[in-house]
Image (cartoon, rainbow, N blue to C red):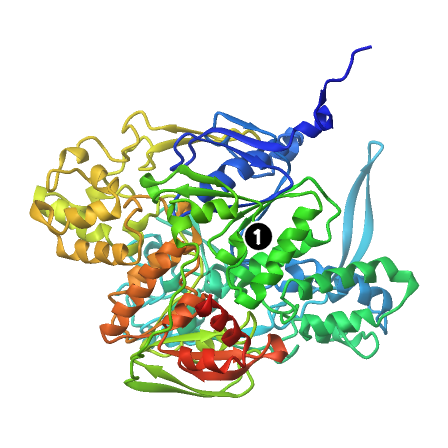
Amino acid sequence: MATTDRGKSGHIADTHDLIKVVGARENNLQDVSIEIPKRRLTVFTGVSGSGKSSLVFATIAAESQRMINETYSSFVQGFMPNLARPDVDVLDGLTTAIIVGQERMGGDPRSTVGTATDVNAMLRILFSRLGQPYIGSSQAFSFNVASISGAGAVTIEKGGRTTKERRDFQITGGMCPRCEGRGSVSDFDLTALYDDSKSISEGALTIPGYSMDGWYGRIFRGCGFFDADKPIAKFTKKELDALLYKEPTKIKVDGINVNFEGLIPRIQKSFLSKDREAMQPHIRAFVDRAVVFTTCPDCDGTRLNEGARSSRIRGMNIAEACQLQISDLATWVGGLSEPSVAPLLESLRETLDSFVEIGLGYLSLDRPAGTLSGGEAQRTKMIRHLGSALTDVTYVFDEPSIGLHPHDIQRMNTLLLQLRDKGNTVLVVEHKPETIAIADHVVDLGPGAGSGGGTICFEGSVEGLRTSDTITGRHLDDRAQLKTTVRTPSAKVEIRGAATHNLRDVDVDVPLGVLVAVTGVAGSGKSSLIHGSLATRDEVITVDQTAIRGSRRSNPATYTGLLDPIRKAFAKENGVKPGLFSANSEGACPNCNGNGVIYTDLAMMSGVVTPCEVCEGKRFQPQVLEYTFGGRNISEVLGMSVAEAEVFFGTGEGRVAAAHKILNNLVDVGLGYLTVGQPLTTLSGGERQRLKLATHMSDKGGIYVLDEPTTGLHLADVEQLLALLDRLVDAGKSVIVIEHHQAVMAHADWIIDLGPGAGHDGGRVVFEGTPAELVADRSTLTGQHLADYVSS
């Protein structure tokens, strides 16, 4: 009988207590090798772009998920996302990875907090069992299921014989038939759809993307339902009805079968089927201009039909339950006792209590998922893991402190430690010193960002990091001081009777010409006040945390408009068309279509990405690369860092004023390390927000509203952000910042603090004044934490 080899602690299985990474080269990682302790809390630090996410998410978590996917049958794998193996030599000791990222939730207007967390599903079952009167199964309480009935003959083949039988069917759903489960109905402002003084051929349509130069022009001119050369104002009633409302109809244009559809049903399908928050900025601006949303008069915004609203438990229907603040709903569910549904009630109570425990008790289940902030979305995703019986799992968190007041970070830290104490490995990418402080092990990447990062600068204890000579170590104990003098406001904006969400008829004056910080715990009403009452004004430029929509073809040059002046400069220098210098247009390599790589789909296997053999990854046709500007070709320009390009286009032969201005803005917001042609899909959340800020820095509006601009910023970069905010104010702009970071609060000229709590415990202005007055007052949670911060 063979003997079992044993480690020092007993069984050999107990020796596998490390995650080993050897030779990681994903993105900017430079052959990184590291050993991470299991069943411990490890925090990864470093400046933005140093390689933290590349190591944690793109290497460790990605390989874990890929290997788990491979345990399924090839049939099941065919329905799952294809994950390529990360660029790493060895990965050993991996456990199942559960990723809790900060991506926004829900792009569908029917997605709510309740549907996204399965709480609605449990409530529907509860009402279908206990609700009086009984109206049907759980589907009868779902606003995503319509009521349908029908009858007809069906053909059935049995034992070689064909028979016909009559069948009836009926589905009882809960969807309100008027608004189709959306809670609101839309009305169109026709003047925003077209200019009726023009004809279709003259470009009367003012809908984004409806150009008459392409297929839309051919379809509208060739449909035959109206005269495309006649001004719309002179259309007959029948012609106008066809233009606006005609159902999809097959027509033939230039010998090709296509579908013609009226403008309004087409807009409803293409634009209004998406959540407003998920729309591209120009589409959102059009929808805001053209479509008026009003609460559905039939269901009063509850999304449910009369049958679903008629069934009640102890006097409450499911719509009213979903409108309650979750902390109140937890109390109501806690008072229910029915042995027949005891397991369901217990599970529902645990989930609702988790919401409260994680600091989201102020939400309601009918809150649209797309309106949650990045931090709220991440904590909502955490809920399903809090009560899990799984152990020896690797939990991966991406800045879980985002959107959290210092008062709430302590609660988050407790949750992270609870997950670790159950025997799990917890990996956290984080910048906040309060979360770094609880780490068992710290890994610091850097020393710089982009090509200047990607190496391990330090690994060890928090105390060791503090005494190390790394950027993170040197800045870990940084504390911004209260300003000795503050600016004097030049004017003010009056907000009166603000009542969005939980605001309680708030009256407040927002000073202009200064740096204003709007503070308060998560859910206190900050965003409701500023976005609901201020951001909609004409002179206001809003830079929020909504994701940048872009494919792997999109990059900082295309997003900021930088590529336009560069293309024109190349074209003028060489006497050719600007389109040649776009990898999405005429100059693209025909073999890879301007991607630089060839993507080969292998069904359920991970796809293969190979560099294009024709252009060698340069994305352009060889003859295009022969054209130069300032001694560089277009591929070399796109390969420059923003900082390099700023110098190149600012001096000497390569001077282009329009390009230099955009690049200067990118450097100002701390993105000098990005590559000009780097795909937007590789940018972190903080980098994307700063990219948006850079695009707005030359706008004409006088008031900037920034939503947590410190998101994703290293401690060393916060100082640079404060200097940028100062420059904006000194240039005559008004800057209003919704922020939790104490350094920004201390640096502000004026603070508006909301609270005192969250949800219905908040919604009031509890302090207005200078940071020094807030610290001296110490009457609010923000004041107490800011006082502790500046005195430590």
Question: For this rendering, which residue is in front, 323 or 404?
Answer: 404
Does 375 sit left or right of 475 as displayed? Answer: right
- Residue name at image x 52 percent, y 52 percent: 436
- Seen in the picture, residue 510 relative to 464 is either above or below; the reply is below
Quarter of the picture holding the N terminus: top right
Residue 133 location, quadrant:
bottom right
Residue 469 location, quadrant:
top left
Question: For this rendering, which residue is in front, 52 or 447?
Answer: 447
- Residue name at image x 38 percent, y 32 percent: 30
Outermost residue, right side: 339
Question: For this rendering, which residue is in front, 696 or 358?
Answer: 358
Indicate the amino acid at tag 1: Ile
Is residue 143 at all visible to an observer of this figure? no
Does 80 sit left or right of 421 as displayed? Answer: left
- Residue name at image x 72 percent, y 28 percent: 9
Does 80 sit left or right of 166 as displayed? Answer: left
Residue 593 location, quadrant:
top left
**Element at badge 1?**
loop
| Image location (x, y in percent) of residue 29 | 40, 35
Does 365 sit left or right of 730 as displayed? Answer: right
- Seen in the picture, residue 583 relative to 437 is either above or below; the reply is above
- Seen in the picture, residue 520 relative to 211 is either above or below; the reply is below
| Image location (x, y in percent) of residue 144 | 66, 62
Residue topped by disc 1: 438
| Image location (x, y in percent) of residue 616 | 29, 28
Q: Crowdedness of circle 1 by 10 Å Cα count: few (<14), some, many (20+)?
A: some
